[in-house]
Image: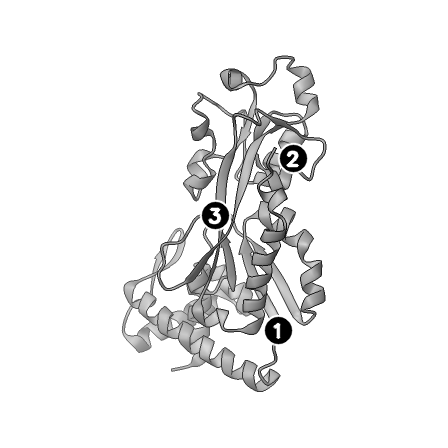
């Protein structure tokens, strides 16, 4: 069996898109397709269901994926050991994270880590869905809810609060003070409910009000921009909104939502010194910024 065919299989399994896999492999999509068919012929089985949504693994494909990942990891560890003589804290660590936490908390706080571990490079990957650690999409995932997987290392990273915010321009146009009783009478900015990848983001249901947002987006950064422009009021993470002095916190005594972040990685990946160091750095980072993540007022 050709190892290159296994590498092609792995990339298609991870991306679930032939064109995306081909781009990452620097190959023509027709070449990738032909090599996949060749591999399936050699194994006398179908590894993927070809659907409009992409290439979805069959049961045999899932079995091959588990074995292929172990092959890839073993080869990677062997090469790393030979090339770097088991060098400590050296190489790239990919962190899969939501865009708000990545942009407004992780990225601004990497300088100290760079100073502590100058030979570690960070790839910060933004996902608006669950990060597939089992398919090697990242080395460490920061998830918005605890995964059910028993094969992964999962550890609670932190709690964080979200509150209701508006811009003074909006409040000046709407003279009525925003209270729990009149929430439905205001312009709202929020998520697109039927496109949420987790119920943890369905904040409006917890306010027990008949709220119909006038602006919705799958991006919390877009929501933040809309609120900042005076378009309406909306729920934002405090670690994001607190860094913008132009925003006003509303109903602070009545609305306070709490969510959690979870660190996730594969046991084999965490054995790498660079991954373990980044893991513990993230733990230290949230411990030092509790006031931003969980403000008391």
Dot label at residue 225: 2
Q: Earlier in the sequence, mark 1 or mark 3?
A: 1
Residue that label 1 marks: 89
Quarter of the rendering occupied by the C terminus: top right
Residue closest to the eye, 133 or 20 = 133
Residue at (72, 34) in percent of width and height: 245
Give the number of marks. Answer: 3
245 relative to 3, above or below: above
266 relative to 103, above or below: below
Quarter of the rendering occupied by the N terminus: bottom left
How would you rate the neighbour count of disc 3 (Cα within 10 Å): few for under 14, some for 14-19, many for 20 or more? Answer: some
How would you rate the neighbour count of disc 2 (Cα within 10 Å): few for under 14, some for 14-19, many for 20 or more? Answer: few
Q: Earlier in the sequence, mark 2 or mark 1?
A: 1
Dot label at residue 144: 3
Residue 37 location (% of width, % of height): 37, 70
* Separation of residues labelled 2 and 3 (CA atoms): 22 Å
Residue at (56, 86) in percent of width and height: 82
């Amino acid at each position: 069996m050709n190892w290159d065919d296994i590498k092609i299989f792995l990339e298609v399994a991870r991306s679930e898109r032939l064109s995306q896999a081909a781009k990452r492999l620097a190959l023509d999509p027709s070449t990738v397709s032909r090599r996949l068919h060749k591999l399936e012929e050699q194994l006398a089985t179908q590894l993927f269901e070809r659907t409009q949504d992409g290439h979805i693994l069959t049961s045999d494909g899932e079995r091959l994926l588990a074995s292929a990942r172990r092959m890839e990891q073993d080869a990677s560890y062997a090469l790393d050991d030979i090339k770097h003589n088991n060098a400590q804290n050296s190489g790239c660590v990919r962190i899969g994270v939501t865009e708000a936490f990545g942009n407004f908390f992780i990225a601004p706080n990497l300088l100290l880590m760079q100073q502590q571990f100058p030979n570690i490079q960070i790839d910060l990957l933004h996902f608006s869905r669950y990060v597939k650690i089992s398919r090697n999409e990242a080395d460490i995932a920061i998830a918005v809810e605890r995964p059910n997987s028993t094969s992964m290392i999962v550890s609670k990273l932190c709690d964080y609060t979200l509150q209701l915010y508006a811009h003074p321009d909006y409040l000046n146009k709407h003279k009525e003070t925003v209270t729990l009783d009149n929430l439905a009478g205001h312009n709202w900015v929020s998520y697109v409910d039927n496109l949420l990848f987790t119920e943890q983001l369905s904040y409006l249901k917890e306010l027990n009000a008949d709220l119909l947002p006038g602006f919705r987006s799958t991006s919390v950064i877009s929501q933040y921009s809309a609120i900042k422009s005076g378009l309406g009021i909306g729920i934002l993470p405090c670690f994001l909104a607190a860094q913008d002095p132009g925003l006003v916190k509303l109903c602070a005594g009545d609305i306070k939502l709490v969510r959690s972040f979870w660190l996730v990685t594969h046991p084999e990946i965490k054995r790498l010194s660079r991954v373990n160091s980044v893991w513990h750095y993230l733990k230290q980072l949230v411990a030092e910024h509790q006031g931003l993540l969980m403000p008391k007022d």
